[in-house]
Image (spheres, helix red, strand yellow):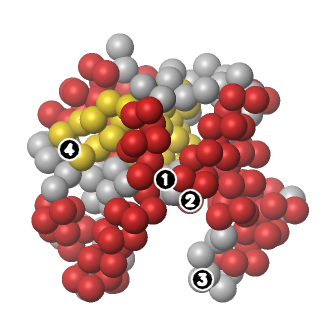
Amino acid sequence: MKILFLGPPGAGKGTQATLVHEEKQFPLLTMGDMLRQAVKRGDEVGKQAESFMSKGALVPDEVVTKVILQCLSPENGLEKSFILDGYPRNLSQAHALDEHLTKQNMPLDIVLFFSVPDEIVKQRIMGREDGRPEDQDPNVTAKRLEEYKQKTLPLVDFYKQKNILKEIDANRSKEEVFATTISLLQ
């Protein structure tokens, strides 16, 4: 099963992706891990990513997309299953991903949208025990949430139109959300 995890920061996507990975043994692909692997490989796209990452700059869309699409191939043993977390983050990336997976004959089977009210998202981000220092700044948290709404939230409609989106109320315990998640993957 080829799965995309989608939702706002603090929705618990990463936690749920890890739990599903452990339960189902589906390969887990996170944007950060794929970028680090590309840098480690040292190929052309890895060098491009490293030139931004070493400066602490955001890696541009086109480079991120090259890295992700390079990883998502049948040669990497992903033709049957994978969990994708952290990509795509905007409609341009979603279109590139969709086109690539279609060409590879590996289309997404399901997109799980972890829905959480804004106030809960803010509380979760601000209260993360392993949070980065900027997570404690309410202005940064508000900016991250606004950026998510502008760029990533439109993906909900994109995947609804493809009839592969399932919404999960993620404003519950980790265990309850996991039970719902697993039930949707049967």
Q: Which mark is residue 170?
A: 4
Residue type at numbered disc 3: Gly
Distance between the alpha carbons at the discs numbered 4 and 1: 17 Å
Q: Given the image, on which type of amino acid does mark 1 rest?
A: Gly
User: Three-letter amino acid code at disc 4?
Assistant: Ala
Residue 54: % across, % down = 68, 81
* Residue visible at 20% across and 44% down in the picture: 170
Q: Residues within 10 Å of mark 4 (few under 14, many from 20)?
A: many
Which quadrant would residue 63 be assigned to in this image?
Answer: bottom right
- Residue named by callout 1: 86
Q: Residue furthest top?
A: 186
- In the image, residue 185 lies at what x, y percent? 37, 20
Kind of residue at badge 2:
Gly
* Dot 3 or dot 2, earlier in sequence: 2
Where residue 141 appears, as percent x and y from the top left, is: 28, 76
Q: Secondary structure at mark 3?
A: loop
Q: Which residue is mark 2?
A: 32
Disc 1 + disc 2, Cβ < 8 Å: yes
Q: Nearer the viewer, mark 3 or mark 4?
A: 4
Residue closest to the eye, 31 or 139: 139
- Residue mark closest to the camera, 4 vs 2: 4
